[in-house]
Image (cartoon, grey):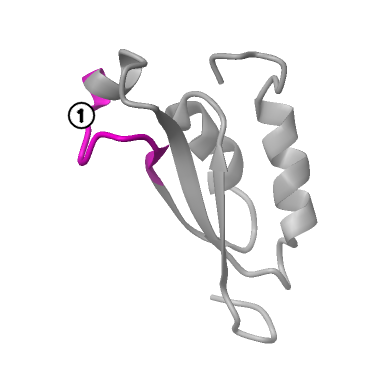
Amino acid sequence: MTGVNNQLELATFAGGCFWCMVKPFDEQPGIVKIVSGYTGGHVEYPTYEEVCSNTTGHYEAVQITFDPTLFPYERLLELFWQQIDPTDVSA
């Protein structure tokens, strides 16, 4: 169910382990769907093991479909920054 404007938006966040990034967003009102995957990189269709080897250039990421009338983008950002350490070079 969406809010008043029925306009869903997408946000993609990379920040270390995508498994850790799903749960904090998953239980919020207005979050419609979360898809885990990879972003960047130079290997087409890498496996999880390849990405974890740090040789593909990919980062684990989540793409969030959300209703901004129920959960604004600014709140997504606030929650994202609580999940990662931006000074960690491995993130």
Task: Determine whether 72 is above or below 53 in the image.
Answer: below
Q: Residue at x 72, y 16 (%)?
A: 87
**Residue under the point 77% across and 51% down:** 75
Q: Is residue 39 magenta?
A: yes
Q: Position of residue 78 (x, y in %)?
A: 78, 42
Residue at far bottom of view? 5
Q: Residue furthest front?
A: 42
Foreground pick, 89 / 74: 89
Task: Please state, as top left, top right, bottom left or bottom right, where the N terminus lies in the image.
Answer: bottom right
Residues drawn in magenta: 36-49
Q: Position of residue 82 (x, y in %)?
A: 73, 29
Task: Residue 18: give x, y in percent of width and height.
Answer: 45, 32
Q: Residue at x 60, y 14 (%)?
A: 89
Q: Is residue 79 left or right of residue 18?
A: right
Residue type indicated by callout 1: Thr
In the rendered image of this protein, does residue 34 appear above or below residue 18? Answer: below
Horizontal side of residue 16 vs 46, given as left or right: right
- Give the left or right position of residue 47, taking residue 66 as reference: left
Decide if residue 49 is on the left or right side of residue 82.
Answer: left
Name the residue beneath numbered marker 1.
47
Q: Is residue 90 above or below residue 38?
A: above
For the point 53% across and 34% down, the residue is: 21
Residue 57 drawn at (x, y percent): 39, 27
Say few, some or many: other residues with alpha carbon within 10 Å of mark 1 (under 14 / 14 to 19 / 20 or more). few
State the quadrant of the C terminus.
top right
Residue 44 is one of the magenta-drawn residues: yes
Q: Where, by quadrant of the figure, is residue 86 drawn? A: top right
Q: Secondary structure at mark 1?
A: loop
